[in-house]
Image: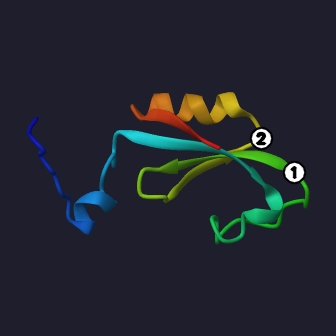
Amino acid sequence: MNDIKLTMSQDQFAHLGEGAVAYLRKVSSDDLRGRFPNLPEIASGLELWALFAANGQPIMLTDERESALGAAIQNDLTPLSIH
């Protein structure tokens, strides 16, 4: 059996999935400050859905999972779930 090893540079890895994949994740409003620095004041203890680009940049925040999925599909991104 041939042992073929493919390697990527850090830059290539950082851009993997860019423009093709979006990550969907349930988040608490209490944990959002680091991910959404420009977020206006929001109530504590809310469970929300966040959509992130492949590089980790936030795309949207919503209270409905279907809205985040719809935004991904509308922008020709394949939505993947993060647990």
Residue 6 at x, y percent in the picture:
16, 51
Question: What residue is at 30 percent from the left and 51 percent from the top?
Answer: 16
Label 2 crowding class (10 Å Cα cut-off): few <14, some 14-19, many 20+? some
Q: Quadrant of residue 36?
A: bottom right
Residue 7 at x, y percent in the picture:
18, 57
Left or right relative to 62: residue 2? left
Q: Are marks 1 and 2 in contact (CB under 8 Å)?
A: yes
> Which amino acid type is marked by label 1?
Leu
Question: What residue is at 27 percent from the left and 67 percent from the top?
Answer: 10
Tell which of 1 and 33 is nearer to you. 1
Tell which of 2 and 47 is nearer to you. 2
Residue highlighted by disc 1: 46
- Point out the tag, 1 or 2, that comes first from the N-terminus: 1
Tell which of 15 and 41 is nearer to you. 15
The C terminus - image quarter: top right
Residue highlighted by disc 2: 63
Left or right relative to 55: residue 26? right
In the image, residue 63 sits, relative to residue 70, either above or below, namely below
Residue 69 at x, y percent in the picture:
58, 31
The secondary structure type at the circle numbered 1 is loop
Residue 38 at x, y percent in the picture:
65, 70
Q: Report, in whole angstroms, how far the alpha carbon at label 1 lies from the one at label 2.
A: 9 Å
The furthest residue to the left: 2
The secondary structure type at the circle numbered 2 is loop
Q: Which mark is residue 10?
A: none
